[in-house]
Amino acid sequence: TDHYATIGKLGSDKFREGDQRTPLGVYFVNNYLSRPYLDKTRGAQADLYGVGAWPISFPNEIDKSEGRTGSGIWLHGVPANTYARAPWASNGCVAMSNEEMLDIAQYIQVGQTPVVIVPKAEWVSKVEWQSRHDAALSLVDGWREEWETLNTQAYLNRYGRLFKNDEGQNLASWSSQKIA
């Protein structure tokens, strides 16, 4: 299924705290804030979140490596007197109608449910999905096999030219370390 959602007032591709944008990437629901909890902690502002809120794991490790900052990005409902908010009307959160939030809430598992935020989704047939899935597994299995058999050059050829490791090394300096 799919649902209409509101994003940040200035669109997507969040870079810094307070920029009014919604992040792009893969995140996980990491908490659930019930409406009674929001009423107790947010008072009159609780209605902004409708039926409840599900904070997500922004910034993730990729965001951090790119210098992205911020916090408090939630999936949440809308005020009781509103069916849905305008397309770009949140402070960076993803807001959906209360009815739709309740619909997806039954599937959300804290710590396990991924939230994929992209500018456009490409829907493919099950056959096409299986083909792409198999190709991705083959790629990862090839990488693993080359790593395990110490086929260093083949292993390194699988990395993109924009590669950067956790310490900030680019592909050239990281590769020379691996070859040595």
Image (tube, rainbow, N blue to C red):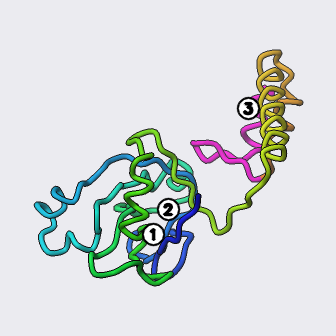
Figure quadrant of the C terminus: top right
Q: Viewer-proximal residue, 43 or 142? A: 43
Q: CA distance from mark 1 to mark 2?
A: 5 Å
Task: Identify the residue shown where x is 77% and y is 17%.
Answer: 148
The amino acid type of the residue labelled 1 equals Arg
Residues at discs 1 and 2 in contact (Cβ within 8 Å): yes
Q: Viewer-proximal residue, 124 or 25? A: 124
Left or right of 87? Residue 165 is right
Check if residue 38 falls in the magenta segment: no
Give the class, few, some or many, for how many residues have Cα within 10 Å of label 3's Cα (few <14, many ≥20): few
Quadrant for residue 82, please give it: bottom left
Task: Identify the residue shown where x is 51% and y is 68%.
Answer: 15
Of labels 1 and 3, earlier in sequence is: 1
When the figure is inspected, residue 8 is found, relative to residue 71, above or below; the finding is below
Left or right of 56? Residue 125 is right
Q: Which residues are magenta?
A: 162-180
Give the class, few, some or many, for how many residues have Cα within 10 Å of label 1's Cα (few <14, many ≥20): some
Q: Viewer-proximal residue, 137 or 98? A: 98
Left or right of 41? Residue 33 is right
- Give the label on residue 16, or none: 1
The residue where tag 3 is placed is 177
Residues at discs 1 and 3 in contact (Cβ within 8 Å): no
Q: Secondary structure at mark 3?
A: helix
Image coordinates of residue 25 in percent, x first then y, are 57, 57
Task: Identify the residue shown where x is 16% and y is 58%.
Answer: 36
